Amino acid sequence: MYVARALEAEGLHVARFGLWALRRHARREDPVERLLRQPKDWTWLVFAPLRPQDLSARDAELLARLAHGLHGVQFLYWSVAESSVTFTAYSVRTTVVRGVPILLPSSPRPEGTLSLPVGPLLPDLTRWASVSEARLTAALIEGAYVERVAGAERGAFTNVDVLALDGGTPVVVEVKRRVRSEAHAGDALTMTVTQAGTLAHLAAAGAEVHVAVLISPTGSARHPDEAIRRGRWQAGAPLIRPGWGEMHVDLWGAAEPVSLATLRRAREVARASAPVQATPLTPPPASDRRAQRSSGTPAGPFVEKGSPARGSLPARLPEPRRLPDELQTPRPAEGVGSVAYPESG
């Protein structure tokens, strides 16, 4: 919320809806199948207490521009009664009119109902006094749907922290907070595969992606407002280490006070000083985005320059080497020591 208010102070429109990403088959066994099918395994959930046709003009424009480059976007309208929350789903498609994406929601369909416990949903709000009760309630409802109705696997879902519109460009800011001593303030952060994949798909869809990290001193973990007052903001970028390493967020430098302008400035400084280590999360050209949408492959700004991309093969594979005759095993005759498998239909 602090970062969202900072972007609003700059004149950006911040989304009034929630956006979540789910990986439906996050545990595929075959790595080749996981690589080929991964783009269509992602489902994007948009939550709002309004129907899609009732969104504000700026929210509708932001959602249309973002959904135009994504696969499998579902809009979920939720309404709260005394003892339950009801969800209504719309499939979201887009069309382009005079160069501008326009939303085309489908007909509504019932998506399910969640029963509410007796008593207030949020009994203690003292820790989050600076966040409105409506925003906390929306976050609770969205999380309950993802876990209880959508049945997402643990670690296979994430939400987009801040989504805004700068002119005609969607802006995504992933917000991290770490409590660290001064000696380890500049250490890299870890990031889950789901979070990294979410940012990669959003960048491929044409969004300008940033990572804002609040480094706060020890003793401020339970007091968010105090952590903001005593901490300092850093800009970062997710990078894949060479090989099959884990996803990390490298800290680029200070972004004080946090804003889109300071995040952009920190990125430009990092690109000028260390272009190999600092790869910006900038949207690809329109021609590249069309090719990525047709192939379903996310953009590659998360791979360090100078290191091979995951799953990439050399231009020419070496010729197979022949085994020495004494190491070759004669093939058994048909019907002897072999198993016949029925042909699949």
Image (cartoon, rainbow, N blue to C red):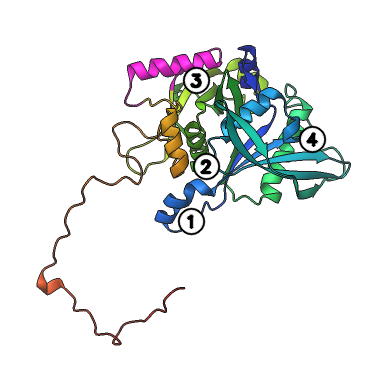
Q: Residue 54 at what x, y percent from top left?
A: 76, 30
Question: What are the residue bounds of the magenta stretch?
Answer: 252-277
Q: Which amino acid is tagged 1?
A: Arg
Whether residue 271 appears in magenta in the rendering, the answer is yes
Nearer to me, 299 or 168: 168
Disc 3/disc 1 C-alpha distance (Å): 35 Å
Q: Secondary structure at mark 2?
A: helix
Q: What residue sits 42% from the left and 31% below the top?
A: 287
Q: Are marks 4 and 2 in contact (CB under 8 Å)?
A: no
Q: Which amino acid is tagged 2?
A: Thr
According to the picture, the residue beneath numbered tag 1 turns out to be 28
The numbered mark, 4 or 2, whose residue comes first in the sequence reads 4
Specify few, some or many for label 2: CA neighbours under 10 Å numbering under 14, 14-19, or 20 or more.
some
The numbered mark, 3 or 1, whose residue comes first in the sequence reads 1
- Is residue 188 in sight in this rendering? no
Q: Are marks 1 and 2 in contact (CB under 8 Å)?
A: no
Residue 326 picture quarter: bottom left
Disc 3/disc 2 C-alpha distance (Å): 22 Å
According to the picture, the residue beneath numbered tag 3 turns out to be 234
Q: Which amino acid is tagged 4?
A: Leu
Disc 4/disc 2 C-alpha distance (Å): 28 Å
Q: Residue 286 at what x, y percent from top left?
A: 45, 29
Q: What residue sits 69% from the left and 31% below the top?
A: 17
Lateral position of residue 95 relative to residue 140, left or right: left
Disc 4/disc 1 C-alpha distance (Å): 37 Å
According to the picture, the residue beneath numbered tag 4 turns out to be 122
Residue 33 picture quarter: bottom left
According to the picture, the residue beneath numbered tag 2 turns out to be 194
Of the 4 image quadrants, the one containing the N terminus is: top right
Lateral position of residue 271 relative to residue 254, left or right: left
The numbered mark, 3 or 4, whose residue comes first in the sequence reads 4
Furthest residue to the left? Answer: 325
